[in-house]
Image (spheres, helix red, strand yellow):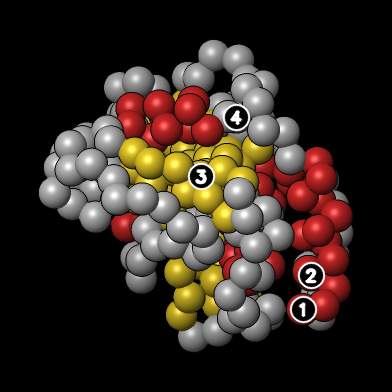
């Protein structure tokens, strides 16, 4: 397994790719400017399947400590879910904590971790929202648009929308709706355990997003991608 961390500044093995993502906008914005960016870029989201063979899936997550955003990316082989590479990035968290604008606080560090990877993932599963967001532009959308990688939002809690009761069996789901629009799915990944909230990020449709979330989930509530990324982001 390859591991890259800012604090260690090392990478085992040779790099397969040297990724550098194009910056679509500045990150040092006011909240009002950030909202405008979301509204503008939301129109670029592709809500249908535009991807090739999925060989590697990646989970991304970010934590915060002492004024820094610590992001982690875990790349797993698909469908075996074997962990093959991890990367972390630590950057100052300059944007304030504002619900609905969290990607401006987290994404710079996440992108820094993604740029360290040797293996370019074919699909991102993000610990957060996709289009299940007031402006239809959560962090899964933001990362998908910036990187061009198909992405899915897999959130532990609901940000907006309403839904009917979801069945108790593993794999049961109901639509999550807002203003008569289906913005995601409330998905039971494990019997008798709280559901997760799945939504489109970029270049994928909802049914396919649900399929990949279930395919990446084993015996726990959260997909293995998320579990690995969260563990890495929480490391000292």
**Mark closest to the chain's N terminus, 1 or 3:** 1
Q: In the depicted view, which residue is nearer to us: 14 or 119?
A: 119
Q: CA distance from mark 4 to mark 1?
A: 28 Å
**Mark closest to the chain's N terminus, 3 or 2:** 2
**Mark 1 vs mark 3: in front:** 3
Q: In the depicted view, which residue is nearer to us: 220 or 71?
A: 220
Name the residue located 67 percent from the left edge and 53 percent from the top edge: 136
**Mark closest to the chain's N terminus, 4 or 1:** 1
**Mark closest to the chain's N terminus, 2 or 4:** 2
Disc 4 designates what residue? 204
Name the residue located 18 percent from the left edge and 43 percent from the top edge: 168
Say what secondary structure mark 2 lies in. helix
Q: Are marks 4 and 1 in contact (CB under 8 Å)?
A: no
Disc 2 designates what residue? 34
Is 215 placed left or right of 50 in the picture?
left
Q: Are marks 1 and 2 in contact (CB under 8 Å)?
A: yes
**Mark closest to the chain's N terminus, 3 or 4:** 3
Please state the horizontal and vertical placement of residue 140, each as a whole percent of the image.
59, 49
């Amino acid at each position: 397994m390859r591991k890259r961390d800012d604090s260690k500044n090392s990478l085992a093995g040779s790099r397969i790719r040297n990724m550098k993502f194009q910056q679509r906008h500045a990150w040092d914005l006011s909240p009002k400017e950030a909202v405008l960016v979301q509204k503008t870029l939301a129109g670029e989201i592709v809500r249908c399947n535009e991807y090739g063979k999925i060989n590697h899936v990646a989970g991304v997550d970010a934590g915060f400590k002492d004024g820094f955003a610590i992001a982690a990316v875990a790349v797993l082989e698909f469908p075996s879910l074997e962990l093959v590479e991890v990367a972390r990035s630590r950057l100052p968290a300059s944007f304030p904590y504002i619900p609905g604008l969290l990607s401006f606080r987290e994404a710079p560090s996440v992108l820094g971790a993604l740029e360290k990877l040797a293996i370019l993932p074919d699909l991102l599963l993000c610990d957060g929202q996709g289009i299940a967001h007031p402006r239809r532009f959560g962090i899964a959308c933001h990362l998908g648009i910036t990187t061009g990688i198909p992405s899915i939002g897999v959130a532990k809690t609901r940000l907006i929308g309403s839904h009917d009761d979801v069945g108790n069996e593993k794999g049961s789901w109901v639509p999550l709706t807002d203003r008569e629009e289906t913005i995601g799915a409330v998905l039971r990944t494990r019997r008798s355990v709280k559901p997760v909230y799945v939504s489109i990020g970029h270049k994928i449709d909802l049914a396919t997003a649900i399929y990949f979330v279930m395919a990446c989930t084993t015996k726990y509530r959260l997909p293995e991608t998320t579990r690995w990324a969260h563990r890495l982001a929480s490391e000292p």
